[in-house]
Amino acid sequence: MFSKILVANRGEIAVRIIEAARKLGIATVAVYSEADRRALHVEMADEALCIGGAAPAESYLCSDSIIKAALRSGAQAIHPGYGFLSENPDFAAAVEAAGLVFIGPSPASIRAMGLKDTAKQLMEKAGVPVVPGYHGDAQELVVLAGAARNIGYPVLIKARAGGGGKGMRRVDRPEDFSAALMAAKREAQAAFGDGRVLVEKLVEAPRHIEVQIFGDKHGNIVHLFERDCSGQRRHQKVIEEAPAPGIGKAMRVAITEAALRAARAVGYYGAGTVEFIADASKGLRPDKFWFMEMNTRLQVEHPVTEMVTGIDLVEWQLRVAAGEALPLEQSDITLKGHAIEARIYAEDPERDFLPSTGTLHHLRFPEKVRGAELRVDSGVREGSVVSHYYDPMIAKMIVHGQDRRGAITALAEALNSTQIAGCTTNIAFLRRMLDDEEFIAGNAETGLISRNKERLTTLPEPTPRLVAFAALAASGVKHDADAQDPFDALVSYGHFHALAHQGTLTYREKPIHYWIKGLGNGRFEVRVKMPGGREEAFALAPSQVPVAARWLNNITLFQGADSFTFSTGEFDTAQSGAGNGGQLRAPMPGLVKMVRVAQKEKVQEGQPLLILEAMKMEHAITAPRDGIIADIIAEGSQVADGTLLVQLED
């Protein structure tokens, strides 16, 4: 076994690998970009080395820098995780050429499965069912359009390299083919540096079912059953489960044997996933599934397989890479219960799932759920920044129950108890997915989310009562339920009577006015005027306020899986990073409208340093203490949430 490995990745997968290595007594070396200097995986590893700038091309995609770091640290092997260089055959070959072990399949296996068209030709020879289509080299419009006509519409144009839905277009009519082809080629070229495509028959009621396979360097290969990954938005997975709902014995035997044939065809060892598309229009049938592609790495959704088999896949990766035989034979691997994984992303479902950036000012995950096992895989913590440089995944939430219904119930409970403030997330969307009738019935196919997008992604407006709670939480009211002193009731007080405390909250750029008056016995009258002019009053106690997170000039209230963020119009400099070594960071994306001080200038506590324009409002960034401006951002800069604005020194 290795004594030290380097983890050539970041985020939750880097954390996952470090944890598995630690169990085996293996020392770990983390690599990080300048943006990840304070990341969780950096802190957890035994050693950490900076390999470049924030952009992946300057760091995590620099194979030479990673290999040099491994050699310098004395690591014997490199684990690529997933994404970045994990499916790059040239990187795998370079690792081996440097005298290191690549913890993954051989470069030849990666290369054989790396291009969809050549992989499908190989699969046809191996007797693996393949979707009818054109996988040839010719890329002229007349050839591809003719192929589409012969296949029969609707068809799917797909990039021959890469994945994740990039370079993919559905075409329903011949007259739309040319425009769709050009768009797919442009997108594929930009994403993968390869604009070539293939054309396939579109499966109308598709289920995305994949099989986890594992091989060793002694010729042994096994499957660890299947996963259903049909819960997808924009051709990318968000909910996965194992085993696949509704799969019968005949279908399972057929699909797992096909996966083993695919793996044997390329002499595969290590962890891999063979992905299939199944026509579920008449249920899952052994004659209605086809090979899509093979991912020659660990998958993001691997935890559901670990939960139902009890096998640590990363540990197996390390053992196989070190030359050991597979720990178990096929007959020893069994299924137990049902597992579901939900990917929690910093993204805005209402805006077509566009990635969101921001600082995770408030982050709470539940520790347990009723009647099931809960696991949360994450590479972030409270205070971490979700930047535009990397994948916006915050965490994977996985539950394992005795049956599928129990697992769904447990995952819903876990999502209801998750609290994240600082950026927009998809938690409410995931929770709504679990209530969908098709999903509950086990009939979800890959188009479910797009067909029901408005219903699944539209968030409810806050009720006047919830706004009243937000006002009470934002007002700074302090009280003792048994106190009669009005000073314990409100911060505003006049002679012989309590004054009404008034203020304004902003929700989605719309102002909401409120007035609060003490009623005694720890209760208050809260009157709110909603954007449409409707006014309502409530008698409330602060103890009734739902869980709230106060951050910067915002307050977020959590109500189950839904969250509502209100701007208070006030900016708290102390929370902008002042306590972090004198660093002041942007509380939200915005424009540096005016810079009032210069580098090396002495400043006093409370002195305005710059003006940040954000959310159509101007926010003064003031000095948290006396000091000297060591560095300050340029006027006119457009900044993301969490961008360093000012560095103070003593």
Image (tube, grey):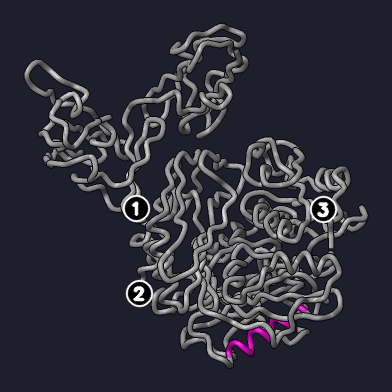
Q: Which mark is residue 562?
A: 1
Q: Nearer the viewer, mark 2 or mark 3?
A: 3
As shown in the figure, which amino acid type bears the numbered disc 3? Lys
Q: Earlier in the sequence, mark 1 or mark 3?
A: 3
> Along the line of sight, which residue is nearer the eye, 87 or 359?
359
As shown in the figure, which amino acid type bears the numbered disc 1? Asp
Few, some or many C-alpha atoms within 10 Å of disc 2 (few <14, some 14-19, many ≥20)? few
Q: Is residue 300 magenta?
A: no
Q: Are marks 2 and 3 in contact (CB under 8 Å)?
A: no
Q: Earlier in the sequence, mark 2 or mark 1?
A: 2
> Along the line of sight, which residue is nearer the eye, 112 or 39?
39
Query: Left or right: 8 with respect to 101?
Result: left
Q: Nearer the viewer, mark 1 or mark 3?
A: 3
Q: Secondary structure at mark 3?
A: strand
Residue under the point 43% across and 13% down: 606
Estimate the spatial distance between the alpha carbons at disc 2 and disc 3, rounded to whole Å: 49 Å
Task: Measuring from the top left, give residue 231's x and y in whole percent.
Answer: 49, 68
The boundaries of the magenta stretch are 251-263
- Residue at the far front: name it: 482
Above or below, comparing residue 177 to residue 249 in the picture:
above
Query: Left or right: 571 with respect to 189?
Result: left
Estimate the spatial distance between the alpha carbons at disc 2 and disc 1, rounded to whole Å: 20 Å
As shown in the figure, which amino acid type bears the numbered disc 2? Glu
Q: Is residue 257 magenta?
A: yes
Q: Which residue is mark 2?
A: 437
- Residue at the far top: name it: 602
Residue under the point 61% across and 53% down: 12
Q: Earlier in the sequence, mark 2 or mark 3?
A: 3
Tell me if residue 104 can be seen. Answer: yes
Q: Which residue is mark 3?
A: 4
